[in-house]
Image (tube, rainbow, N blue to C red):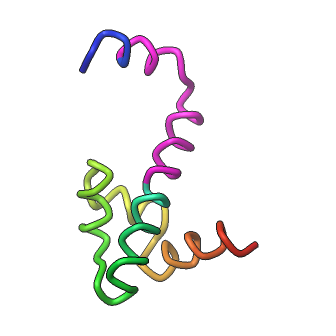
């Protein structure tokens, strides 16, 4: 990791890191769902796109349906 990224990470709170991770997950999931549809995407696909372990997906969203709903709600409040 470059030194600038390391120092930036140290200056952010855990809540900020969590929010950033959730945003990355939602962005990646939205992109994948729009290209492949609900049944063409797995939580592992999304996790791989973000660069996190797939168990983190369950931690934040529970299951694929909850992730899909969160992506949809973000665009259609």
Q: Quadrant of residue 10?
A: top left
Residue placed furthest toward the front = 35
Image quadrant containing the N terminus: top left
Would residue 38 appear left or right of 72 to someone viewing this image? left
For the residue pair 29 and 61, the one nearer the viewer reads as: 29
Q: Position of residue 46 (x, y in %)?
A: 32, 64
Residue placed furthest toward the bottom = 39
For the residue pair 40 and 64, the one nearer the viewer reads as: 40
Residue at image x 30%, y 79%?
A: 41
Residue at image x 28%, y 56%?
A: 49
Q: Position of residue 17 (x, y in %)?
A: 50, 35
* SS assignment for the magenta stretch, majority: helix
Would residue 34 appear left or right of 69 to someone viewing this image? left
Question: Which residues lie in the magenta part?
Answer: 6-24
Q: Quadrant of residue 48?
A: bottom left
In the image, residue 10 lies in the stretch drawn in magenta: yes
Circle count: 0
Would residue 53 appear left or right of 73 to someone viewing this image? left
Q: Position of residue 19 (x, y in %)?
A: 56, 44
In the image, residue 20 lies in the stretch drawn in magenta: yes
Q: Position of residue 32 (x, y in %)?
A: 36, 71
In the displayed structure, would residue 53 be above or below residue 18? Answer: below
Residue at image x 52%, y 51%?
A: 23
Residue placed furthest toward the right = 77
Residue at image x 76%, y 72%?
A: 77
In the displayed structure, would residue 55 be above or below residue 43? Answer: above
């Amino acid at each position: 990791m470059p030194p600038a990224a390391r120092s930036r990470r140290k200056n952010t709170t855990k809540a900020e890191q969590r929010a950033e991770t959730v945003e990355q997950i939602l962005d990646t999931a939205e992109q994948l769902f729009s290209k492949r549809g609900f049944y063409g995407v797995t939580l592992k696909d999304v996790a791989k796109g973000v660069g996190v372990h797939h168990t983190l997906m369950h931690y934040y969203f529970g299951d694929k349906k909850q992730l899909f709903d969160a992506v949809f709600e973000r665009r259609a409040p």
